[in-house]
Image (tube, coloured by chain):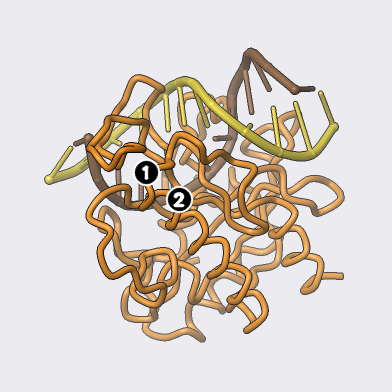
Chain colours: A orange, B yellow, C brown
Amino acid sequence: MQNLSPNNQQELLHSAHLLTGATLGEIAQAFEICVPDNLLKNKGWVGQLIETALGATAKQQAIPDFPELDIELKTIPISAQLTPLETTYITTAPLVNLEQLVFEESPLYHKLKHVLWIPIQGERDIPLANRMIGTPLLWQPSSEQWRLIKQDWFEIMEQITLGRIEYLNAKHGEIIQLRPKAANSQVTTAAIGQDGAVIQTRPRGFYLKTNFTNTLLQEHFL
DNA sequence: CAATGATCATAC
DNA sequence: GTATGATCATTG
């Protein structure tokens, strides 16, 4: 086990494969990191642990976890049946300054271009330290997946542009959904209102729906 | 019991 | 507030 930053895709995948079968407690111990009792007040702990274990460098920036490799790292909690237990956060949704929207220039496009999925047991009755890491999967959307993603993105962005943010909810979209993403429901940010004026609303984020990540994992592991 | 809306920690 | 990492927990 090493925490050096990988020099190429092969090194990263090799490191990721070495984690297969290990428990979060073992990884934490190797890096002298304390395991919290639960994730209630530490929801990003698993993702940050795996970042450390794989040598991710883009700690606090709006760029892929491995900038040189253009790869985004995502841990995904799974059930005993290997189905995702949670949706997957992708990135913040822009609500203002929406001129000249080009999908290929959007943060969402760049985040999804190359994703290294690390499935991890996520059922709450398994103590955090005992949860086992699964086989990694380096995924790139197929042309058909891109088509659906782009369609969802466009429809959502169109509504935002038209000042219909308050009419959008998590039900929109086949693959991508828009949901609040903030410290709490009191947080506000600027957005376009129905008459075109600037309004205050809750910040939103793009998420991958579980039915999509489910088929994604099934296609690869079944 | 899945899904939607709410929330937690931390850096800047 | 924004962006990183996500999961919690109420609701339908």
Q: Secondary structure at mark 1?
A: loop
Three-letter amino acid code at the position of disc 2: Gln
Q: Does residue A155 appear to the left or right of A128 in the view shown?
A: left
Q: Is residue A109 above or below residue A214?
A: below
Q: CA distance from mark 1 to mark 2?
A: 6 Å
Can you say which quadrant of the picture contains the C terminus of chain A? bottom right
Three-letter amino acid code at the position of disc 1: Gly
**Could you say which is closer to the camera, residue A178 or residue A10?**
A178
Q: Is residue A212 above or below residue A77?
A: below
Chain assignment, label 1: A
Q: Is residue A68 visible?
A: yes
Q: Position of residue A6 (x, y in %)?
A: 39, 77
Q: According to the image, label 1 marks what residue?
A: A163
Q: Can you tell which mark lies on residue A44?
A: none
Q: Secondary structure at mark 2?
A: helix
Q: Can you tell which mark lies on residue A159?
A: 2
CB contact under 8 Å: marks 1 and 2: no
